[in-house]
Amino acid sequence: MSDVFLQQREEFSEYTMRRIGVSRELFDEFNRLLAPHVTHLHFRKGEYLQRAGVPATVAYWLYRGVARRAMLTRDGTDVTMAFSAEGDSCGSHHDLLAAQDGQPAQEFIVAETPVTAVRVEWATLARLREEHHIMREYYLKVSEHSIRRYSQSCLIRSMTSANCRLEAFREHYPHLEQRISQKALASFLGITPQYMSTLLRQQQA
Protein backbone atom coordinates (compact mmCIF):
# COMPACT_ATOMS: atom_id res chain seq x y z
CA MET A 1 0.00 0.00 0.00
CA SER A 2 2.93 2.36 0.61
CA ASP A 3 3.91 2.23 -3.06
CA VAL A 4 0.30 2.89 -4.12
CA PHE A 5 0.14 5.93 -1.84
CA LEU A 6 3.43 7.31 -3.17
CA GLN A 7 2.25 6.86 -6.76
CA GLN A 8 -1.03 8.62 -5.97
CA ARG A 9 0.74 11.50 -4.30
CA GLU A 10 3.11 11.83 -7.26
CA GLU A 11 0.13 12.50 -9.54
CA PHE A 12 -0.50 15.69 -7.57
CA SER A 13 3.10 16.60 -6.73
CA GLU A 14 3.27 19.83 -8.74
CA TYR A 15 -0.18 20.90 -7.59
CA THR A 16 0.65 20.23 -3.92
CA MET A 17 4.08 21.82 -3.92
CA ARG A 18 2.73 24.97 -5.55
CA ARG A 19 -0.40 25.09 -3.38
CA ILE A 20 1.26 24.82 0.03
CA GLY A 21 4.70 26.13 -0.89
CA VAL A 22 7.03 23.20 -0.21
CA SER A 23 10.16 22.03 -2.00
CA ARG A 24 10.47 18.76 -3.90
CA GLU A 25 12.78 17.42 -1.21
CA LEU A 26 10.36 18.24 1.59
CA PHE A 27 7.41 16.81 -0.34
CA ASP A 28 9.18 13.53 -1.04
CA GLU A 29 10.49 13.04 2.48
CA PHE A 30 7.13 13.81 4.07
CA ASN A 31 5.39 11.22 1.88
CA ARG A 32 8.09 8.61 2.52
CA LEU A 33 7.68 8.95 6.28
CA LEU A 34 3.89 9.00 6.10
CA ALA A 35 3.39 6.13 3.63
CA PRO A 36 3.59 3.20 6.12
CA HIS A 37 0.84 4.73 8.25
CA VAL A 38 -1.95 5.40 5.73
CA THR A 39 -5.12 3.47 4.92
CA HIS A 40 -7.12 3.71 1.69
CA LEU A 41 -10.89 4.07 2.00
CA HIS A 42 -13.82 4.47 -0.38
CA PHE A 43 -16.97 6.46 0.43
CA ARG A 44 -20.23 6.46 -1.47
CA LYS A 45 -21.94 9.74 -2.27
CA GLY A 46 -23.65 10.98 0.89
CA GLU A 47 -21.45 9.01 3.30
CA TYR A 48 -19.76 10.83 6.16
CA LEU A 49 -15.99 11.04 6.47
CA GLN A 50 -16.46 12.85 9.78
CA ARG A 51 -19.55 13.31 11.96
CA ALA A 52 -20.31 16.27 14.17
CA GLY A 53 -20.72 15.53 17.86
CA VAL A 54 -17.89 13.01 18.21
CA PRO A 55 -14.16 13.74 18.52
CA ALA A 56 -12.33 14.02 15.17
CA THR A 57 -9.40 11.60 15.26
CA VAL A 58 -8.42 11.17 11.61
CA ALA A 59 -7.32 13.36 8.72
CA TYR A 60 -7.86 12.61 5.04
CA TRP A 61 -6.25 13.32 1.71
CA LEU A 62 -8.48 12.98 -1.35
CA TYR A 63 -7.26 10.97 -4.31
CA ARG A 64 -10.57 11.02 -6.17
CA GLY A 65 -13.87 12.81 -5.60
CA VAL A 66 -15.30 15.85 -3.84
CA ALA A 67 -16.07 16.26 -0.13
CA ARG A 68 -17.90 19.04 1.68
CA ARG A 69 -17.05 20.37 5.14
CA ALA A 70 -20.03 21.89 6.94
CA MET A 71 -21.79 22.48 10.22
CA LEU A 72 -25.33 22.84 11.52
CA THR A 73 -26.24 26.05 13.32
CA ARG A 74 -28.46 26.04 16.40
CA ASP A 75 -31.53 26.64 14.26
CA GLY A 76 -30.63 23.67 12.04
CA THR A 77 -29.23 25.59 9.08
CA ASP A 78 -26.63 23.68 7.06
CA VAL A 79 -23.63 25.99 6.53
CA THR A 80 -20.91 24.82 4.14
CA MET A 81 -17.43 25.88 5.22
CA ALA A 82 -15.33 24.52 2.33
CA PHE A 83 -14.97 21.92 -0.40
CA SER A 84 -12.08 19.57 -1.05
CA ALA A 85 -11.33 17.78 -4.32
CA GLU A 86 -8.59 15.63 -5.84
CA GLY A 87 -5.19 16.35 -4.36
CA ASP A 88 -6.56 18.28 -1.36
CA SER A 89 -6.30 17.49 2.30
CA CYS A 90 -9.69 17.14 3.93
CA GLY A 91 -10.42 17.79 7.57
CA SER A 92 -11.28 20.41 10.14
CA HIS A 93 -8.04 21.52 11.76
CA HIS A 94 -10.01 23.09 14.61
CA ASP A 95 -11.87 19.85 15.32
CA LEU A 96 -8.71 17.74 15.15
CA LEU A 97 -6.98 19.97 17.68
CA ALA A 98 -10.08 20.12 19.90
CA ALA A 99 -10.27 16.32 19.93
CA GLN A 100 -6.93 16.20 21.71
CA ASP A 101 -8.80 17.62 24.72
CA GLY A 102 -11.71 15.23 24.20
CA GLN A 103 -13.99 17.84 22.66
CA PRO A 104 -16.49 16.73 20.00
CA ALA A 105 -16.27 17.90 16.39
CA GLN A 106 -18.38 20.91 15.47
CA GLU A 107 -18.26 20.15 11.75
CA PHE A 108 -19.13 17.20 9.58
CA ILE A 109 -17.52 16.11 6.32
CA VAL A 110 -19.65 14.39 3.69
CA ALA A 111 -18.86 12.91 0.27
CA GLU A 112 -20.49 15.04 -2.43
CA THR A 113 -19.43 12.46 -5.03
CA PRO A 114 -17.97 8.97 -4.62
CA VAL A 115 -14.64 9.50 -2.85
CA THR A 116 -11.38 7.60 -2.70
CA ALA A 117 -9.44 8.89 0.30
CA VAL A 118 -6.27 8.24 2.22
CA ARG A 119 -6.77 8.18 5.98
CA VAL A 120 -4.20 8.77 8.70
CA GLU A 121 -4.69 8.89 12.44
CA TRP A 122 -4.16 12.37 13.88
CA ALA A 123 -2.29 10.84 16.82
CA THR A 124 0.11 9.23 14.36
CA LEU A 125 0.74 12.55 12.67
CA ALA A 126 1.41 14.13 16.06
CA ARG A 127 3.90 11.39 16.92
CA LEU A 128 5.68 11.74 13.58
CA ARG A 129 5.96 15.49 14.11
CA GLU A 130 7.67 14.84 17.44
CA GLU A 131 10.09 12.37 15.87
CA HIS A 132 10.98 14.14 12.59
CA HIS A 133 11.71 17.81 11.99
CA ILE A 134 10.71 17.30 8.34
CA MET A 135 7.19 16.44 9.48
CA ARG A 136 7.05 19.54 11.68
CA GLU A 137 8.21 21.72 8.79
CA TYR A 138 5.62 20.25 6.44
CA TYR A 139 2.87 20.59 9.05
CA LEU A 140 3.72 24.28 9.44
CA LYS A 141 3.28 24.81 5.71
CA VAL A 142 -0.02 22.92 5.71
CA SER A 143 -1.22 24.98 8.68
CA GLU A 144 -0.35 28.23 6.91
CA HIS A 145 -2.23 27.04 3.84
CA SER A 146 -5.22 26.06 6.00
CA ILE A 147 -5.34 29.58 7.45
CA ARG A 148 -5.24 31.09 3.97
CA ARG A 149 -8.07 28.82 2.78
CA TYR A 150 -10.18 29.73 5.81
CA SER A 151 -9.59 33.45 5.21
CA GLN A 152 -10.55 33.12 1.55
CA SER A 153 -13.77 31.32 2.44
CA CYS A 154 -14.63 33.99 5.02
CA LEU A 155 -13.97 36.70 2.44
CA ILE A 156 -16.27 35.05 -0.08
CA ARG A 157 -19.10 34.66 2.43
CA SER A 158 -18.68 38.26 3.61
CA MET A 159 -19.54 39.69 0.19
CA THR A 160 -22.92 41.37 0.34
CA SER A 161 -24.05 40.36 -3.16
CA ALA A 162 -24.97 36.74 -3.88
CA ASN A 163 -23.80 37.29 -7.46
CA CYS A 164 -20.40 38.40 -6.19
CA ARG A 165 -20.19 35.39 -3.86
CA LEU A 166 -21.02 33.05 -6.75
CA GLU A 167 -18.35 34.58 -8.99
CA ALA A 168 -15.80 34.37 -6.18
CA PHE A 169 -16.72 30.72 -5.62
CA ARG A 170 -16.15 29.99 -9.31
CA GLU A 171 -12.76 31.66 -9.17
CA HIS A 172 -11.74 29.92 -5.95
CA TYR A 173 -13.12 26.49 -6.93
CA PRO A 174 -12.76 26.27 -10.73
CA HIS A 175 -14.48 23.29 -12.40
CA LEU A 176 -16.28 22.33 -9.18
CA GLU A 177 -19.73 23.82 -9.77
CA GLN A 178 -20.90 21.03 -12.07
CA ARG A 179 -19.76 18.34 -9.62
CA ILE A 180 -21.78 19.45 -6.59
CA SER A 181 -25.48 19.90 -5.96
CA GLN A 182 -27.17 23.30 -6.16
CA LYS A 183 -28.19 22.74 -2.55
CA ALA A 184 -24.52 22.41 -1.46
CA LEU A 185 -23.54 25.48 -3.45
CA ALA A 186 -26.42 27.48 -1.96
CA SER A 187 -25.29 26.43 1.50
CA PHE A 188 -21.78 27.76 0.81
CA LEU A 189 -23.13 31.03 -0.59
CA GLY A 190 -25.51 31.52 2.33
CA ILE A 191 -28.69 31.55 0.25
CA THR A 192 -31.69 29.24 -0.10
CA PRO A 193 -31.78 26.56 -2.82
CA GLN A 194 -34.78 28.39 -4.28
CA TYR A 195 -32.84 31.63 -4.61
CA MET A 196 -29.90 29.66 -6.02
CA SER A 197 -32.15 28.44 -8.85
CA THR A 198 -33.38 32.00 -9.46
CA LEU A 199 -29.81 33.33 -9.51
CA LEU A 200 -28.71 30.75 -12.07
CA ARG A 201 -31.74 31.42 -14.27
CA GLN A 202 -30.99 35.16 -14.20
CA GLN A 203 -27.41 34.52 -15.29
CA GLN A 204 -28.56 32.32 -18.17
CA ALA A 205 -31.09 34.87 -19.41
Image: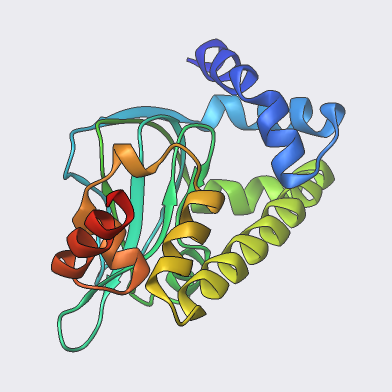
Single out the residue that lies furthest toward the bottom. 74
Q: Residue 139: image x %, image y %?
A: 71, 52
Q: Residue at x 57, y 67 (%)?
A: 150
- According to the image, what is the colour scheme of the structure? rainbow
Q: Splitting the image into 4 quarters, where does residue 81 fall?
A: bottom left
Q: Is 84 rendered above or below residue 160?
A: above
Q: Is 75 rendered above or below residue 100?
A: below
Residue 26 visible in rendering: yes
158 left or right, relative to 116: right
Q: Residue at x 18, y 44 (%)?
A: 47
201 left or right, relative to 35: left
Q: Splitting the image into 4 quarters, where does residue 143 fall?
A: bottom right
Q: Residue 154: image x %, image y %?
A: 53, 74
Q: Is 115 rendered above or below residue 78?
A: above
Q: Residue at x 52, y 53 (%)?
A: 123
Q: Residue 99: image x %, image y %?
A: 43, 69
Residue 32 visible in rendering: no
Q: Residue 136: image x %, image y %?
A: 77, 51
Of 63 and 100, nearer the camera is: 63
164 left or right, relative to 128: left
173 left or right, relative to 56: right
Q: How many marks?
A: 0
Q: Splitting the image into 4 quarters, where does residue 45 fall?
A: top left
Q: Residue at x 81, y 42 (%)?
A: 134
